[in-house]
Image (tube, rainbow, N blue to C red):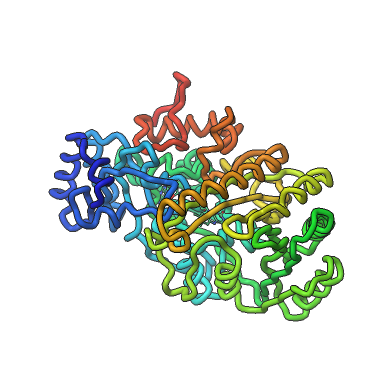
Amino acid sequence: MSDIAKLLHRHQPSAQRSFQDLVHDRLPSTPVSFPQDATFDEATASWNYLAPAQPVGVVAPRSTAEVQEIIRCAREAGVTQLAIRSGGHSFEGASLGGRDGHAVVIDMVEMNDITIDRDAQTATVGGGTLTGNLMVAAFEQGGLMLPTGECIAVGMGGQIQCGGYGHYSRTYGILTDRLLRAEMVLADGSAVTVDEHTNADLFWAIRGSGTGSFGVITSLTVQLNKAPAAPANFFIKYPMTDAASFASTFKAMQEYSLTAPPAFNPMIVIWRGNLEILGSLATETAAERDALVADMREKLPPTDQFDIQPADYVETMRIQGLEDTSAPYYPDLSDVRRERREHLRYMKIKAGFVPEPFTDEFIETLAEFAITQPTEGLRIQILGLDPNSGLPAEATAIKNRDCPWLMGMSCWVPLSDAGDIATMEATGKNYEQWLNQAYEIFYPYTTGGYIGDDDYAEGDQGRDMFDSYYGRHLPQLKAVKSKYDPDNLFHHKLSIPVSDEPSAPQR
Ligand SMILES: Cc1cc2nc3c(=O)[nH]c(=O)nc-3n(C[C@H](O)[C@H](O)[C@H](O)COP(=O)(O)OP(=O)(O)OC[C@H]3O[C@@H](n4cnc5c(N)ncnc54)[C@H](O)[C@@H]3O)c2cc1C
């Protein structure tokens, strides 16, 4: 255990010690890690330098019964904060309790069974399963898929609750809309089914609230679909030379993206000195793919960097991960695992849903600024969505539907590149200034942040984080929270608060 960790854990409340005793007594073979254990640093490690957390213990249940027992022990010992961790990708470290937290972490890493029903085209997975592992199993066992984000080391448990937007979303929608049923353990230790008919209010809330506010998802069942039979990736690049050519190219990219056939899944990316449009073609035959590529060639501005890569569905996801992400990736898909500290980096994210096509005025302002972007460590990505697809706006707790674009931007500095912490931090802060300026250009055109890209800085400058992420759904989310977790056991800075209304419903 490091000196800093020792300092942080010096004043453990005695209640936590008795939690430790209770867990040791009642769950003697369950993997646990407490501050005095040699495993503790590793068990609480985060990939993000900007998300330091100070959990008081980590317990990794292997069954629903064990999750129930952990919660009973916590209640008995007077634990006041439980955090739930699956893929560990929360940018702010919410799944370790957050910066100011002192949480017992329920680490779902051991609950990762995957069962594919080929006839029903469904998958039932443990709450700690990673999206990449489900992707491979679904494809290998039945040529099936479901839309997820680009990073395949993200957890299903977290992403199902916030959206899941990626390289096939314009064609197939988003991950959250695929949830058919969840099994959950609630704050009182009860195990419940959550679907359209049973605990329907909770089913609504977990689809979009994204914050582990309501209880532990131990298992979830999702709808799959046939993977496209003849897909391809495309990578089309234009060197950023001057603002005028940036603006005209961007306008052409937008026009094509908004009107292209549904099989076209675009992302406009600004990084490494290039303005790029890249993504996947969800085409069913080689002829359909060739026709779409011909259409792209005709309608997008000419460039000598126009690369089309046909591959099977899983390979298209793997290649996008290798060539098109600021996140660490896994060249060998059998190696996908939760990140710990091996890719420690300074990483800041900002994101926003864009409800209308970008105006010429916006594009011209962006162009002037974009050409000043450093060629390393900064990326703006603008993902094309189908504003007319997906579940009805009120069917789930997702705030932002009907948007043609989801903008995300990040800066990152891997420790391995920087060499030491001080250099990493100084470089990261420098990049972050550029990032914040870029965000302010987008901000007036956005209609709220993406809770999957959790960003405490959204609360700076007097902006209301809860309005940004949850908007009109917040009163109903608070009512659901009050019903299922009235003592606010599952909490962190961006979790749904207990209702301040006196008439909050009781279970
Ligand atoms: C490098 C990177 C790339 C990303 N790329 C994309 C992308 O392409 N598209 C996209 O849509 N999003 C993307 N995201 C965002 C990601 O989808 C969200 O951060 C998501 O919430 C992460 O889920 P997780 O389980 O990995 O994270 P965790 O940190 O484990 O959990 C995130 C939140 O969900 C809760 N939670 C997790 N598991 C459970 C469970 N079993 N039961 C109840 N609550 C639970 C946690 O308590 C926490 O509040 C990316 C994030 C990163 C860091």
Left or right of 103? Residue 134 is right
Residue 493 visible in the current orientation:
yes
Q: Quadrant of residue 469?
A: top right
**Can the viewer see residue 192 in this picture?**
no
Residue 76 is situated, as x and y percent measured from the top left of the image, at: 20, 36
User: Residue at horizontal 77%, vertical 51%?
Assistant: 367
Numbered disc total: 0
Q: Farthest residue in the top direction?
A: 502
Q: Residue at x 18, y 49 (%)?
A: 36
Q: Position of residue 323 (x, y in %)?
A: 59, 70
Q: Is residue 41 above or below residue 444?
A: below
User: Dividing the image into 4 quarters, which one contains the C terminus?
Assistant: top left
Q: Residue furthest bottom?
A: 286
Q: Left of 361 or right of it: where is 172?
A: left
Q: Nearer the viewer, residue 142 or 411?
A: 411
Residue 492, above or below 273 = above
Residue 296 falls left or right of residue 345: right
| Residue 278 pos. (x, y %) | 69, 65
Residue at figure coordinates x 65%, y 42% from the top left: 437
Residue drawn at (40%, 65%) of the image: 337
Between residue 300 and residue 376, name the one nearer to us: 376
Residue 372 location (% of width, % of height)? 70, 52
Closer to the camera, 472 or 417?
A: 417
Q: Residue furthest right?
A: 298
